[in-house]
Structure formats: C-alpha cells, structure tokens
Amino acid sequence: MSGNPCARRLARRSRSALLVAALGVLLLQTLVVWNFSSLDSSSAGGDGGARSREKREERAAGLNKADRERPRRGLQRRSDPPPPLLGKAAGRHKLQADVYHSHRPKEKLRLDSNNNENSVPKDFDTIDSNSNLGARSQRQRAPAANGKRKPDKAQPPSMLGKSANEVLKHGPVPPRGTGHGHNRTHVRKPHPQLPTASAPAQASNQDPPFDQVKEAATPPPPPLEVRKEQPQCEISGKEVISALSRAKSRECRQQIVEVYCKHKERALMPEKVPRYCPIEGKANVNVQWDEDPSEAARLAPVRVAFVLVVHGRASRQFQRLFKAVYHTSHYYYIHVDQRSNYLHREVLSLAGRYPNVRVTPWRMSTIWGGASLLTMYLRSMDDLLKMADWSWDFFINLSAADYPIRTNEQLVAFLSKYRNMNFIKSHGRDNARFIRKQGLDRLFFECDTHMWRLGDRKIPEGVAVDGGSDWFLVNRRFVDYVVNSRDELVVSMKRFYAYTLLPAESFFHTVLENSAHCETMVDNNLRLTNWNRKLGCKCQYKHIVDWCGCSPNDFKPSDLPRFQQASRPTFFARKFEASVSQEIINQLDSYLFGSYASGTPSLAAYWENVYEQETDGVAGLSDAALSHHHAFARMGLSRAAGSLQGHPNDNSCRYVAMSHPVSVHVYFLSDQFQGYLVGSSRGHKPSLHPAGESGDLGDTQRPLQPGQPGPPHQPAAARPDGVSLKQVLVLVLQVGADWDPKERLFRNWGGLLGPEEEPVAVQRWSRGQSNLTATVVWIDPTNVIAATYDILVDAAAEVTHYRPPLTAPLRPGLWTLRVLHHWSPLGQTSFIVAPLEFHRQQPIRREDAQRLHGGPPRNSYMEQSFHGLNPVLRLPVSLGAVEEAEANAGLTGAPLRRWLDRLLEGHWSAADVCSMGPSACPVMQRCRHTAWSSASPDPKSELSLPREDGRIR
C-alpha cells in the first residue's frame, strides 16, 4: 500500500519515513509523519496442526508428560541442523497462529475506550488467563510511575443504591481451571507462572484534574486485607476472596464484605417476585414498515427524547451523528462519561447553541457490564420526566458509535403508527442457556470501577427473566413505570439488578415482559449491529469485569449494501468508528442526505484529539508520549528556522519551546493514519511571544528494512516440511503496543514505544496452502537477542500476533525484528524504543535515567539467555555498541534530547508548519488555510443553525 502522493511530495523525505510537521506562532501546529505500515489483518485456523506438530517435536526431543506441560524455549526443530552453543536456549515458545482463538494483549485501560457494548458473554472460567495475550504473569512491574489518580469525590445518590464508582485499573481474575487445556492457542512459554488471586492490582487509571501532576500509584494492598475489615460473617467463597485480594480501596473491600454477608444471610436478593402480565409466555407484536406518506400525514407526529451516551475523544464523529439525528421537534439529553473531560467540554459548547439540547448536570463512570450503566439510564429517564417544558413520546438511547440508516422523517412516521409499542430486542435463545451465559445466576458488585464476581445466587421465583440488547426504544408510559412505580415487581427488580452483570441488557426486558405492559413488547430494537463473534469475543474486558463478553465490530465500506437492503424495520446501525473507517460514514451520509458539493474540503480527512492540556493536564500523557511529542515539536521548530526564513540573519522565524504541548491530534486521510499534529506554545528567539502547533505523519507500509536479504517471495529450494519460500510472503511486519485483535490494528498510533512498554509483533501473511513454522527473533540495539519463539501458522491464517514477556525496561535505541523459516529470512523490520526525556512529567533525573535506559537487570530480557544464537544469526556482539549504550543511559538534559531527536529523525520528520494566529514570520502560513491542520475547514463535522425544515444536515 502506498501513502498519499501529496503528502510524499510535501515531506520530501527519505524512503525510511514520511513526515509532516506544522509549527505556529500563536499556536503552532507541527505535522509529523512516521514510517508506518497500516494493517488490516484477519486470520483463521484450527489448532489441530499445532497439536500434531507439538506431539512430533516432543517425541523427537524425548519429552515426558511433565515436560510437555511445562513451557520451553529455544530454536531446536526436528530436521533442522543442530545450531551450535544453544545449551538451555534450545527450549522455546510455540504459538499456533489463529486470530480467532488467540487472546488479546493485556489492555492498559483506555479511559475512553468503547466499553459499553451489548454482549452475551462467555463464562470467564473458560478463558485461560495464562495465555500470552492475557494479563501478564511473567513478571510483576513496579507500580506505574504515571498512574493517574484523583481524590475521592462525592457521588450523587444512585437510583439503584450503588456507591460512588471510582476509576481504578485491576488485573484479571484467574480462572478456576488454569490448565493449558483451556488455551486453544498453543504456546510454549518461558515462564509457566500462573496469576494468583493475590497478585498485586495495577495502577489507577483515572484522569486527575488538568492542573494536577501525576503521582505514583498506590502500592497494592496485602492479600486478604478483609481480615482487617472485621468481616460480619465468615468469608469462605473463593470468588469473594479473590475479589478482596484484588480490590484497591479499603472502601471497596468493605462494601464487598457487606454485600457478601447480606447475601449469605439471604437479606440482599428478592426470593420471589410477582408477575403482572395477564398472558402466559412472551408477548411479541409483529410490526410492519409501510412507507405510506398519506397515512403518515394523518397521524400526529411523535416527539423523541434522544439520550446520547458518549465517551472517548471522537468529538467530530459525535458531531456528525448529532447533525444526522437533529431536528427542532425532538429533544437531546447528553451524558458524557466522567472520565471524558475533553469531550464534555466540546459537548457543553454544542449544547449552548440549541435550545432543545441539554447535558446532564451529573456524570458517571459507566464501565462495560457495570451496574452504573443501568443507574445512569434510570437517572436520565427520571430527569426527562421532570422536564415540564419537554413533551416527548419516545425514549431512544444512542452512543457516539451509532449512526442512522433511515431519515428522521421515516423514523417519526414509523413510531407515530406504533406509538403505544416498546421496541426491545430479546436474546432469542433457550432461557436457561441465556441465564448461564449472561451470568445472571452469579452475584456481582461494582466498586473501584470494576465489576467483581462474588459467588452464585438464585433467580427469583415468579418471573420470567429475559434480556438481549441494551439499545432500545421505549415509550413514555413505560419509562414512567420503571422510574416511578413502587409496585413489588419494579422495586424487586431494581434490587436484583443492582448486583447483576450487564444489567442494562436484561432489566428493561424482564420488567416489560412481566408487567402489565407486556403486550406492548416488540422484539426488535430497530437497530442493525455488526456482530462478528469470531473476532469480537476476545475476553477483552477482563481488566474491568470478572467475566468474558463480546463487542460488535466496526462497519466498513463493503457493508453499505446491508443498510440499503435491510428489510425489517431498521433505523440505526452500530458500530462506526471514524479512526477505523470514516469512508463508510461518508457513504451512509451521502445515501441518506445526498453528497456534499464537489470541491468540499476535508471530506477524506479525519482528526481526533488525543490530548488537550486544558482538560487533561500534563498527566494526561504518558512519559513516553510526552517525550515523543516534545521531540516532534522540536522537529517543527527546526523546520521553521531552516526552511521558512528568508535570510540567515533574520530571526523572525526562529522559535523556542515555551511549555509542554498544548494539544495533540491524530490525523487520518482516506482511512490511513498519517501522523500527529502537536500544538505547542512557542516564543520568538530571544523574545517570548506565544506560539503554535506542530504535527507528525506516518509513512507507507514497508515490511522489509533496507539491507536485509532478498525479498521473501524470491524463488527458493523446497524445505524439509514441503513449504518453499516462493509460496510465502510476509506482507507486513509491525511492532507496537495496545494491539486490538477485533479491529486488527494498533491503538497506539504510530507505535510510540518507551522503555516500559509491552510491545506486540504482528505479521500479515500471503502464501500458499501449506502450514508454516516461522521463527520470530527480537534483537535489541546492542545485538542482545531479547526473545525468540516459533509461530505455527495455519494455512488459512492471514495475521499472527504475539507479545513476548520481555522484562522491562527495554533498552532504548533501534530494535530489529526478524522472521525466519528454517534459518532463511522471510522478513525484517526495525522499530524505535525511545528514551524518556520526562519521568512522572518532570525532566528525568540521572538516577532514573540510568535505571530506565540501562536495559533489564543482568542484561536479560527473559529468564534464559539466547546469546548462543548470536553466531547462528550472524549477530556479532559489538563492544563499542555496548559502551555507547552504557554512556547514553546516563544522559539527561540537552545531551538526552539530542539522542532522542537523532533516534526519531530516522523514522519521523516534520513536513510543514503553520500558525494558529498572526505571525511575525512573513512566510508562515495560517493553520486554517492548510489542508492538514486540525484548524483547517471541516464542513462535514461543523455544526450550523437549523434550517427552516428543522434539520441541520
């Protein structure tokens, strides 16, 4: 795949990277481009090949059963020439490549991740948490230096009697069965340690106030501190003991004890609940979508209260959704997650322009699967009922990942015909199986922004439990019933679902089916959801819930016919994510409202904010990101001084950095990541006038580094296993952090890696029908072999990924990743591990630099050393490189900045500079006049006042 040709001409850089940077005077914007290989990967395959391969190699090695159960490392293979000097390094990992069965890397909880998805979860116990891509049990890191913390805040009273929810990050719960038989991805691991219930919890992940400097994470509590809490009953269940050992705060642990003891005393749950539905079984009214304009004209049009539940940072995508659903006849009530301060600021600005738009005066941190989401819905419903000036007929909940697939007029005509109905989607499964898969027979409790599983429970007698999607359309009568009714059904169900996993996916269904409103239920929520359970069910929420669930995939341009050909009444679809595919949103928007005029700017461009100093504070950036963005800004300053000034003695275009970055955006063009736009405050040299913004862009895909052996698709002799290299091509080799196996991309755009990151290697394949065993080798800047493992690539696999359990800190510098097949190269790539200019958002001190930049203890990234492979791989150990690395490890101040800049300039460069305001530099362009700046015109996302027909779009 090639990069944008205009960006290539603008950057005028070497083939190693395409970079664009922009700097400004009042607010300078720098555009920086990276040597980036974008990846759209998918894979399939079973595990039979891995099992047979493993058995053959075990027999050849003479392993007994106990040995087979213990992970090993090395490069030995049957039919391979024995490499010299391997010793213990002969053992090695083996991973069968199967994207459908591999587990996701340990997620660093993104504050604004799309985590509220309807799902039917798998039992948490069936997931092997010892999987490589699960939470790391290899080593326990020290508490994160930049863990984000906030002082406790008072929470508003909960509709469900819930406590305040805090934002803390936790490790996953170990499964009941920790044997390797649970893991369908076969890996021979170097460290067979299993996570235990008393493993230390991880660092807090809550945004501090923007002016608050990050503090060190609170050390983990001692195991089973519940004994200090003087429990009211005997704590005997293994699930509650596990929860108590992992909960961070004393308040949360005390609440867990209280809930558990009340449940043990049978004082928590209702045991029997009355059913008020006059009919037996489930009512289901069939409705038809008949677009008869004459009939619609005779009906009084309904008015809709849209409740928009949003989080994240994708403000421009949210504005496009708002434009598409807005009409002056309807009402819009917006809840912004408590952790999304930047988006909250943007939404407040939006709401101030329209009289029928309001933002909740309260905010909650709603987590995936948590009771807090149901609490938020009930409180929003209560608010809407109390708004005397808003006369609405239907309640519709939407997220920023939704988009309409029919017009507002069509929706109103349909609902006006069925104004007494409630549209809610049921699971459509056997009820007993649904209860088991949904975890409704388990006791859960939410605190510390985590959903803890505390044990088993019984479903109340007398009612039929139902559930399905948590996206619905319900009428005002039913909303009033669930909020204000004091009958035993509603009161008991609120008690029951206060301690239930995914309560919003079942509460409304169960109350509707068992109440006097049961005959108004339509088993259709009028939505189209993009389910792909092979990719979406990756147990990706273990860090926030003791369960495994599923999440829909993002729509792509190829899905447009699904919207056009929808036969059943369908008015909305999900999920859409502009950073993954804006093109499908453009197509759908044009389908509904017509195309924008020819020549409209920025139709293929997309910007998303990743940092804003005003709302996030400097603590909103990790030390690695902060160090990168300072270096990117210096690239922009250098470009301004060297390229824009007209005379060597003219200082009007010479700038100096004044502070930390003001803002950072990621920039996409035609659905391809281009780079970063770093907004910085700059001053003239030597005066101190304010400044501007700068940005970084990514380069085209390039799987092979210069100077490596011939291309992997060159003809080659047949190998002993029958696979010839002419059948094999590694299209992309990529290393990064925060790998998303559902969408098959890195969420750490551009691969900004620091010494404490946990990198993942991804390979995309295109080859013949034979299975393949590939060897992946990680090499640090001093030619130390950090890790090596085999990947058993199934014939149907397109993508493989694996995160080796490397011991931190990684040595800064240029790393190399090689992929081999029987010692012959298939591909090679390099990536940068950047040194940290800042530690805990302050300039790094010498003692911290030596610790973080000196490599791992004893120069060993794994328990075993692979130095015996250096001769085999022709990697001489250079004494000069070792001495240079040791010298660099102690650098601080200007020498450290020069080292960092020199490393990054090999993969990034600044291509352009702009100013947010007037500039003394005569050739400095204004950002709003560029095509790439986040300040440039973006008509598709910009809002205007309503037209005479009441619409914006």
Image: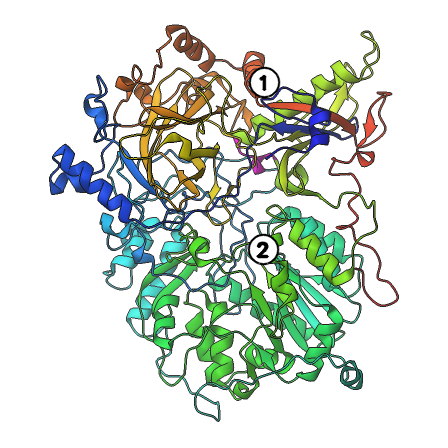
Q: Residue furthest bottom?
A: 278
Please tell me which residue is depicted at 67% across the width and 26% down the height of the picture.
659
Q: Which residues fall within the magenta stretch?
A: 618-623
Please tell me which residue is depicted at 73% across the width and 38% down the height of the picture.
934
Residue 682 x/y as whole percent? 74, 24
Q: Nearer the viewer, residue 829 or 724?
A: 724
Residue 888 x/y as whole percent? 47, 12
Q: Nearer the viewer, mark 1 or mark 2?
A: 2
| Quadrant in which the C terminus is drawn | bottom right
Instruction: Left or right? Give the position of 240 relative to 539.
Output: left
Seen in the picture, residue 219 relative to 921 is either above or below; the reply is below
Q: Which numbered disc, 1 or 2, marks the residue that appears first in the sequence?
A: 2
Q: Are marks 1 and 2 in contact (CB under 8 Å)?
A: no
Residue hosting label 2? 555
Residue 791 x/y as whole percent? 33, 37
Q: Could you tell me the amino acid type at mark 1?
A: Asp
Residue hosting label 1? 901
Q: Is residue 621 highlighted in magenta?
A: yes
Seen in the picture, residue 438 relative to 730 is either above or below; the reply is below
Q: Nearer the viewer, residue 726 or 806?
A: 726
Q: Could you tell me the amino acid type at mark 2?
A: Phe
Q: Is residue 336 highlighted in magenta?
A: no
Please tell me which residue is depicted at 79% across the width and 84% down the height of the picture.
294
User: Main SS type for the magenta part?
Assistant: helix
Instruction: Left or right? Give the position of 700 relative to 292.
Output: left
